[in-house]
């Protein structure tokens, strides 16, 4: 049994809470901005009701064994307000966020040896306050370390595939290739089905090619067919699936474009690799962020 705090309980935070609940035996603490009186995760096997304490103020927090960060990537400073109490006994911090800059975001707040970046894949949506819909299987990848193995053990018995990999850069950049084209859904204000169109597919392939080129320069091993693989994965999703960028835009919330497409620009500039389509997507989403719906 472990005491596990989850900071940020949107779609992914909810999924992770549901997985921990089905693993059984853990004491779960949900750290949120607003009260969350209940949390239910709808899975293919049925509803999972998460038994957890909900805290809305870092001053209420106590030391735990693990901290799992599922907040938005742009809110590192706000997330870190929880660490002083939650990590009082040296708890490691697992970062389940989008992008490839997990360590850079939290280096000012947590020592490097206690940071555990996690790549998580799971089509999920926050259907309502306190309700999360899992629309597919969950999978996680982590760098092959002792601490990562301890993280994986938290989920023993739950319905998630966890892989410990030697080349973590590949996992990070493969996920970012997938996330990069999610910008098209947010810009078009349409769910995943929009990527099945011929014109949109061509643009998506070029965006992924830019991302993959930068990822390879960062040490990722990505095949030349990565673009088609990404599109095929989107096509396997229900056509009405809503990714988090689109969900945030529709709700008038700030979007993670800078953590996704913006990261491609930053790393591309470092290697002298042009990324014009991702640059355009980032610029448009930044403009939308300044004038939400």
Image: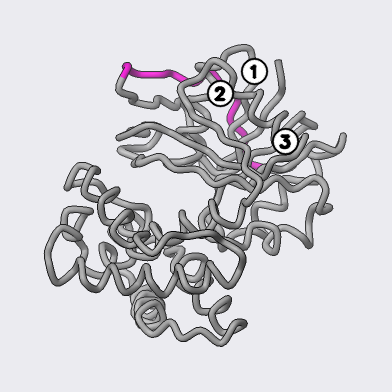
Q: Secondary structure at mark 1?
A: loop
Residue stretch rendered in magenta on the structure:
45-57
Would residue 247 be found to the left or right of residue 286 on screen?
left
Q: Residue at x 42, y 64 (%)?
A: 255
Labels 1 & 2 near each other (Cβ < 8 A): yes
| Residue closest to the far front | 224
Q: Which mark is residue 208?
A: none
The stretch drawn in magenta includes residue 163:
no
Which residue lies under the disc numbered 1? Answer: 26
266 lies above or below 67: below
Q: Position of residue 213 (x, y in %)?
A: 47, 73
Mark nearer the N terminus (1 vs 3): 1
Element at badge 3?
A: helix
Secondary structure mostly seen in magenta is strand
Q: Is label 2 in a helix, a strand or a loop?
A: helix
In this picture, is 141 found above or below 149? below
Q: Residue furthest top?
A: 25
How far from the left and from the top, in percent, is residue 96? 57, 46
Q: Residue at x 70, y 64 (%)?
A: 104
C-alpha span from label 1 to label 3: 19 Å
Question: Residue at the spot x=47%, y=36% of the render?
Answer: 139
In the picture, the quarter occupied by the C terminus is bottom left
Report which residue position mark 3 lands on. Answer: 60
For marks 3 and 2 on the same chain, the one whose residue lies earlier in the sequence: 2
- Contact between marks 1 and 3 (CB within 8 A): the answer is no
Q: Could you classify mark 2 by the number of other residues whose Cα lies within 10 Å: few (under 14), some (14-19), or many (20 or more)?
A: many
Q: What residue does disc 2 label?
A: 20
| Residue nearer the viewer, 32 or 196 | 196
Label pair 3/2, CB-CB below 8 angstroms: no
């Amino acid at each position: 049994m472990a005491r596990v705090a989850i900071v940020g309980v949107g779609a992914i935070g909810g999924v992770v809470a549901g997985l921990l609940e089905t693993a059984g035996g853990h004491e779960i603490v949900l750290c949120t901005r607003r009260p969350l009186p209940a949390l239910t995760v709808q899975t293919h096997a049925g509803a999972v009701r998460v038994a957890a304490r909900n805290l809305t103020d870092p001053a209420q927090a106590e030391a735990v064994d693990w901290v799992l960060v599922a907040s938005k990537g742009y809110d590192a400073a706000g997330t870190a307000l929880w660490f002083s109490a939650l990590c009082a006994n040296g708890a490691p911090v697992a970062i389940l966020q989008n992008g490839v800059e997990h360590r850079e975001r939290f280096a000012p707040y947590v020592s490097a040896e206690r940071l555990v970046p996690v790549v998580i894949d799971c089509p999920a949506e926050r259907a309502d306050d306190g309700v999360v819909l899992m629309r597919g299987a969950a999978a996680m990848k982590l760098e092959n370390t002792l601490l990562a193995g301890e993280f994986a053990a938290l989920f023993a018995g739950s319905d998630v595939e966890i892989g410990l990999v030697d080349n973590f850069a590949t996992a990070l950049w493969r996920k970012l290739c997938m996330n990069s084209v999610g910008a098209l859904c947010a810009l078009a204000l349409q769910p995943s089905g929009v990527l099945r169109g011929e014109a949109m597919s061509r643009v998506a392939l070029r965006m992924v090619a830019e991302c993959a080129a930068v990822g390879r320069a960062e040490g990722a091993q990505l095949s030349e067919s990565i673009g088609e693989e990404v599109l095929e994965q989107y096509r396997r999703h229900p056509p009405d699936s809503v990714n988090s960028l689109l969900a945030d835009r529709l709700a008038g919330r700030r979007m993670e474009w800078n953590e996704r497409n913006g990261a491609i620009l930053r790393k591309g500039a470092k290697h002298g690799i042009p990324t014009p389509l991702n640059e355009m997507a980032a610029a448009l989403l930044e403009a939308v962020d300044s004038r939400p719906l």
